[in-house]
């Protein structure tokens, strides 16, 4: 009996062991499947088309958003192929999603379709200790994101319904996991309206060079924006929701400083419905960004200011803007001159024009009475350093060019020279051609060599005179001796 009980016990234990092993094996076998299913759910992106309006009729604007249900650290996507009924609508424009401002988009248009790709331009790429790339996306979202919007206009004679759909969702590249992508729902809209349109709304409102606030909505009729002081006219771009709506824009020219009212008046096709959109355009009183400043190579700080309207600008310089030290500021430029002219305040002297050389980082105050502007350099008249002596023949003098009086030196030969310093405070003498107005570096003649030549000339002249005297005396003596031999004198007895 005991042996029988032990045998049954062993059989029962074996069954339990086999059952446990089977359960463990099944669980282990199912783990990859469960893991794969979870990974797929976490990394799946669905691309769909969504319409912003459903009550459409012939001639109406139809805006369709192409959306992704999520963007899990996507650095690149596309090409996403958007399709529409080309016999019912025409393509008007494309706009990238506002959330994806860090992306660069490329679109390819075909009949009835548009292919769009996007790439993150601000993604960060670093390397780990093993030299492997570590990529960080600049944007990520677990909620729905508008990739781009397509603006279509229905043809005047269209009827029935219009379809828009995602032909190919493309591929999405994530820095985390492999992403699966599928095409979601499309748009099928009935063209329901007949007769004259009463739609007096606009589908788009933009002002070139600035952004309006709040974000445009056809049902919001009042907006604001600001423009620079130099802007006296704004270009308003309006897209009427219906093809036959009449749009009139007024107040966008001859802007005054401060607040200006620009009106967009829209009258519907039926001639009855009317809407007015108002934009408050503020023309800034200053062209200079707030707290804009400049630091030169010596560490001196200058503040940018607006130049007074009545200030005299040097001849040949024209007004423009330059990007300097992180600011877009008003500047004056001249062809052939490297430096730009800026209106600055150094904190001590009164504000004025300064020449700024972006290569050398030098700032030189403009003095109209002592500054000569050359193609390759900005030169100013300065005093001759005490360690430089002027030749006696050059005397202090002035020359009137007609536009300025130059201080310098002149010699009896009519040569007029000046001591000038460039933007780096390097000084030298310059010859000024009073006939042509051109200048060039002047070098004084070496007087020591001239004196040496004079001394040598005098020495050689004396030697030559002595030699002439010796030769003359020698010739005289020789002639005397020859004469005495030829004609001897009679001897006296």
Image (tube, rainbow, N blue to C red):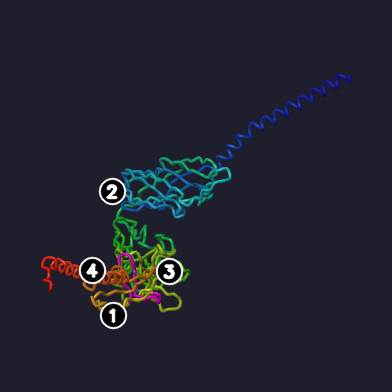
Label 3, secondary structure: give it: loop
Tell me the chief SS of the magenta region.
loop
Determine which residue is flagged by label 1. Answer: 397
Identify the residue at horizontal 45%, vertical 66% (top origin): 297
Q: Secondary structure at mark 2?
A: loop
Residue, disc 2 = 157
The numbered mark at residue 289 is 3
Q: Judge the density around disc 2: few (<14), some (14-19), many (≥20) Cα neighbours within 10 Å.
A: few
**The residue stretch that appears in magenta:** 370-387
Residue 224 at what x, y percent from top left?
Answer: 40, 67
Residue designated by label 4: 467
Count neighbours of disc 4 (C-alpha within 10 A) and say few if under 14, some if 14 to 19, many if 20 or more: few
**What distance separates the C-alpha of mark 2 from that of mark 4?**
122 Å
Judge depth for marks 4 and 1 and give the one in front: 4
User: Few, some or many C-alpha atoms within 10 Å of disc 3 (few <14, some 14-19, many ≥20)?
Assistant: some
Residue 267: x and y, percent?
Answer: 31, 62
Q: Secondary structure at mark 1?
A: strand
């Amino acid at each position: 009996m005991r042996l029988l009980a032990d045998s049954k016990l062993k059989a029962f234990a074996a069954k339990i062991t086999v059952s446990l092993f089977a359960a463990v094996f099944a669980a282990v076998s199912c783990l990859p499947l469960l893991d794969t299913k979870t990974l797929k759910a976490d990394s799946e992106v669905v691309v769909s088309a969504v319409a912003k309006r459903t009550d459409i009729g012939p001639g109406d604007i139809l805006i369709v958003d192409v959306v992704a249900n999520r963007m899990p650290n996507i650095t690149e996507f596309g090409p996403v192929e958007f399709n529409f009924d080309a016999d019912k609508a025409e393509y008007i424009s494309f706009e990238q999603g506002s959330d994806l401002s860090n992306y660069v988009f490329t679109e390819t248009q075909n009949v009835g379709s548009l292919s769009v790709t996007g790439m993150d331009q601000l993604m960060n790429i670093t390397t780990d200790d093993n030299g492997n790339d570590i990529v960080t996306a600049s944007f990520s979202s677990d909620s729905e994101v508008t990739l781009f919007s397509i603006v279509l206009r229905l043809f005047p004679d269209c009827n029935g319904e219009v379809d828009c759909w995602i032909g190919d969702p493309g591929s999405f590249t994530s820095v985390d996991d492999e992403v699966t992508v599928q095409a979601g729902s499309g748009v099928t809209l009935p063209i329901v309206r007949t007769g004259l349109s009463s739609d007096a709304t606009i589908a788009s409102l933009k002002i070139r060079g600035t952004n309006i606030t709040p974000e445009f909505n056809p049902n919001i009729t009042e907006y604001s924006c600001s423009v620079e002081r130099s802007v006296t006219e704004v270009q308003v771009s309006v897209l009427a929701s219906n093809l036959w709506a009449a749009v009139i824009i007024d107040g966008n020219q001859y802007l005054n400083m401060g607040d200006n009212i620009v009106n967009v008046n829209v009258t519907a096709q039926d001639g009855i419905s009317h809407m007015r959109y108002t934009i408050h355009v503020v023309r800034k009183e200053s062209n200079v960004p707030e707290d804009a400043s400049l630091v030169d190579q010596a560490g001196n700080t200058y503040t940018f200011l607006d130049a007074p309207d009545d200030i005299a600008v040097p001849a040949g310089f024209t007004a423009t803007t330059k990007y300097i030290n992180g600011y877009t500021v008003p500047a004056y430029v001249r062809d052939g001159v490297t430096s730009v002219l800026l209106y600055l305040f150094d904190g001590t002297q009164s504000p004025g024009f300064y020449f700024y050389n972006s290569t050398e980082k030098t700032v030189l105050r403009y003095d109209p009475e002592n500054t000569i502007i050359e193609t390759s350099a900005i030169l100013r008249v300065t005093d001759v350093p005490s360690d430089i002596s002027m030749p006696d023949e050059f005397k202090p003098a002035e020359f009137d060019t007609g536009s300025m009086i130059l201080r310098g030196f002149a010699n009896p030969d009519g040569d007029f020279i000046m001591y000038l310093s460039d933007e780096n405070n390097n000084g030298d003498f310059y010859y000024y051609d009073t006939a042509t107005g051109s200048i060039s570096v002047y070098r004084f003649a070496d007087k020591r060599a001239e004196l040496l030549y004079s001394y040598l000339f005098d020495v050689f002249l004396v030697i030559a005179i002595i030699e002439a005297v010796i030769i003359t005396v020698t010739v005289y003596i020789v002639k005397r001796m020859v004469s005495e031999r030829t004609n001897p004198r009679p001897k006296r007895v």
